[in-house]
Amino acid sequence: MHLVVLGAHCGDAEIQAGAIAHKYAKAGHDVTFVHLTAGEKGNPPGVSVEEYREQKMRESEKVAEILGAKTITLDYKDAELTFNDEIITCVATLMRKLKPNVVITHWEKSIHPDHALCPRIVQAAQLKAGLPGFDLDGLPPHYYGFYHSENWEDMEGYEPDIFVDVSDEFDTYLEALSNYWFIMNSKSFRYYDYYKALGTVRGCVNRTKYAQTLKFPSETNVRKGGIIPGYEV
């Protein structure tokens, strides 16, 4: 089985669901982080946008290695994502190639426009990838389910439906996150502290040491449980 975690920028997918990803990679499933952009416009002083793009891609590869996953960064520009047929077709074609059973992405509401576009793109690509009438590089149709995960910028209306016990994976998750410069050095947000605390709080509610959460798309049937439906660990 194949789990894809798709984020707007290098780092988003990993902070949101990196411990979940590691849990399923350990259980023998294929896991791929897909970044629509590198998130390169948050470049540090003295580092160009292009240099920071290359840096973040290198960091993403190290993080994926630690978590037992693969990583793909597409060539779209940070803070310039648009919802159009070109990007929908690109993602749909990629999904036909990767054949994920499940995709995890951002929640529908966000203070960051790139984040808010991700679930719209994932849902539109879901339809296009699954319909046989679309010829996408000659690849066979493929349909996948998707869920939302938790990001500090995407919290409006986010109420978890699934709590996944990641107690055994959380230390490795934190080790992986520490390889992103922005997570450890941001002056605007304490990423590392926040996501360590969030995993702790969600674990308290779940009666486990640590947990990460998922949410069903709006207007779909809600089922509560401790694993991603359809995945065995």
Image (spheres, grey):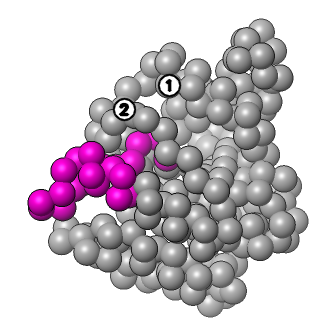
Looking at the picture, how far across and down is residue 54, in whole percent?
A: 36, 52
Q: Secondary structure at mark 2?
A: loop
Residue lying at the far left in this picture: please name it. Answer: 46
Q: Is residue 180 visible?
A: yes
Residue type pointed to by label 1: Ile
Which residue position holds label 1?
87
Magenta stretch in the rendered image: 35-56
Identify the residue shown where x is 27% and y is 52%. Answer: 51
Contact between marks 2 and 1 (CB within 8 A): the answer is yes
Relative horizontal placement of residue 24, taking residue 111 as reference (left or right)? right
Q: Is residue 54 magenta?
A: yes
Residue type pointed to by label 2: Leu
Mark toward the start of the polypeptide (2 vs 1): 2
Quadrant, the C terminus: bottom right
Residue 81 numbered mark, or none: 2
Q: Is residue 180 above or below residue 126?
A: below
Q: Residues within 10 Å of mark 1 (few under 14, many from 20)?
A: some
Looking at the picture, how far across and down is residue 126, in whole percent?
A: 68, 30
Relative horizontal placement of residue 33, taking residue 131 as reference (left or right)? left
Q: Quadrant of residue 29?
A: bottom right
